């Protein structure tokens, strides 16, 4: 069966009213911190990128898709977070492979910041991915860098102009390479007042010249708690003027609905209760050992109690469950205090096989970074064995919960 590329609702306004898409939320980690993004999970009333109700493993995602397809046909299956697909390349590529094998007649797409996209472009083409969206907020290093608090590239954190230069070069080269593979490219550009609003038509000119097929100029949605949360929402007249000027270089998309990372259905449809229930059912299915994060990290002074703040921990004890109980698999040394976000990103990488962290306290910023990497933060105090039983067996730990309080920015463990 041949695929009609015109049936992608995000690339064609003619298709958005009668062709459905479904996003599989298998990519929780992100390699950039955008100034406009707050990746808040389990918020069913919000419709914006970075939001989802549940994160799935690749095989959970396939199960979810199979059940969803029983209710209706989806022309497009995409991966759009809630982090970035290529900050989670193993999960992303495995999911695409499973879906392509099971449903060769559907279009596959991914939405990405483009920072780690290029190494996977040949494999995307082999798997039949037809559409890729890249969010490009600047085509000069200064402007691009202002859109991000930081980026993580080749295990190093960059900020400002240095970050802008790296991500800009990766994005523009990716557009060329995707074009050469015959993959259609859409550019998302966030209109950020005072940051890049003057610059959007230049993004259109450069990316259109490299082979992008359409651009989606999105007005900033100010989100509380983000760097740009205080900025005004761009006026309708300004947005229309930017789209008109950008349209001289590349066709414009004007029907975007700011899809969630777990969106399903037509663009104008809200998530149905039936689809939401299927998503939660899939997320609760047991994982196979190959795809599970089988370990739990514990912050403890003496090894008997969960009683240590993450910021004070020089090491974390890593536990795994087997048929005889819970056992320490290893002790992992934590990076020394300092270095800002880089410290917490390093810890998140060292806990990549851990589904949860048990600690008596954690600062706001490390909690954001570790949660975004897929580690569930559980603030409790008490016996380690009891807390581990709660995590591994799904028991209620409310009686052990620590009352959350403010964390001083000058204390160890705070951002």
Image (spheres, rainbow, N blue to C red):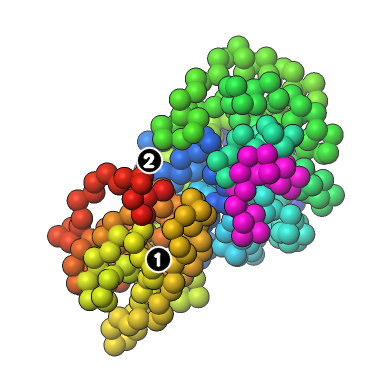
User: How far apart are labels 1 and 2 at the CA level?
Assistant: 23 Å
Q: Nearer the viewer, residue 351 or 210?
A: 351
Examine the rendered structure and indicate whether residue 256 appears above or below residue 264: above
Q: Pick out the residue farthest to the bottom.
A: 324
Left or right position of 360 against 67: left
Q: Do the numbered discs 1 and 2 sit on residues whose CB atoms are within 8 Å?
A: no
**In the rendering, which numbered label is found on residue 355?**
1
Asked if residue 364 lies in the magenta stretch, the reply is no
Give x and y (percent) for residue 84: 57, 50
Q: Nearer the viewer, residue 185 or 340?
A: 340
Give x and y (percent) for residue 45: 37, 36
Q: Is residue 130 visible?
A: yes
Q: Nearer the viewer, residue 281 or 49?
A: 49
Q: Which residue is mark 2?
A: 44
Residue at 61% of width from left, 60% of height from top?
155
Give x and y (percent) for residue 261: 50, 45
Asked where in the image residue 333 lies, by quadrant, the reply is bottom left
Secondary structure type for disc 1: strand
Badge 2, how many Cα within 10 Å: few under 14, some, many 20+? some
Residue at 47% of width from left, 64% of height from top?
335
The range drawn in magenta is: 151-170
């Amino acid at each position: 069966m041949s695929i009609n590329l015109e049936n992608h609702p995000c690339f064609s306004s003619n298709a958005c009213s009668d062709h459905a898409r479904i996003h599989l939320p298998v990519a929780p980690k992100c390699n950039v911190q955008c100034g406009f993004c707050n990746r808040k999970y389990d918020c069913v009333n919000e419709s914006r990128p970075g939001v989802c109700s549940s994160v799935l493993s690749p095989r959970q995602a396939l199960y979810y898709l199979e059940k969803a397809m029983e209710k209706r046909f989806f022309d497009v299956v995409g991966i759009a977070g809630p982090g970035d697909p290529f900050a989670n390349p193993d999960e992303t590529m495995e999911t695409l492979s499973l879906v392509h094998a099971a449903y060769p007649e559907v279009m596959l797409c991914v939405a990405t910041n483009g920072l780690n996209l290029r190494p996977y472009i040949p494999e995307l083409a082999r798997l039949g991915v037809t559409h890729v969206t890249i969010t490009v907020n600047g085509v000069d290093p200064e402007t691009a860098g202002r859109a991000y608090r930081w980026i993580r590239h080749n295990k190093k954190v960059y900020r400002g102009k240095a970050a802008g230069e790296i991500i800009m070069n990766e994005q523009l080269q990716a557009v060329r390479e995707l074009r050469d593979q015959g993959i259609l490219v859409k550019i998302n550009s966030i209109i950020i007042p005072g940051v890049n609003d003057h610059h959007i038509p230049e993004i259109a000119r450069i990316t259109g010249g490299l082979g992008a097929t359409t651009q989606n100029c999105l007005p900033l949605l100010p989100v509380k708690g983000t760097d740009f949360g205080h900025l005004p929402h761009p006026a309708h007249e300004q947005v229309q003027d930017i789209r008109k000027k950008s349209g001289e270089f590349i066709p414009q998309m004007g029907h975007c609905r700011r899809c969630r990372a777990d969106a399903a259905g037509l663009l104008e449809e809200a998530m149905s209760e039936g689809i939401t229930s299927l998503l939660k059912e899939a997320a609760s299915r047991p994982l196979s050992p190959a795809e599970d994060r089988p370990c739990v990290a514990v912050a403890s002074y003496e090894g008997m109690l969960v009683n240590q703040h993450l910021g004070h921990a020089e090491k974390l004890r890593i536990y795994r469950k087997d048929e005889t109980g819970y056992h320490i698999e290893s002790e992992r040394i934590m990076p020394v205090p300092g270095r800002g976000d880089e410290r917490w990103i390093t810890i998140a990488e060292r806990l990549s096989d851990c589904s949860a962290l048990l600690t008596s306290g954690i600062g706001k910023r490390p909690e954001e970074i570790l949660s975004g990497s897929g580690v569930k933060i559980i603030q409790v105090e008490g016996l380690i064995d009891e807390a581990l039983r709660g995590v591994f067996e799904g028991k209620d730990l409310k009686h052990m919960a620590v009352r959350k309080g403010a964390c001083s920015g000058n204390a160890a463990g705070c951002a």
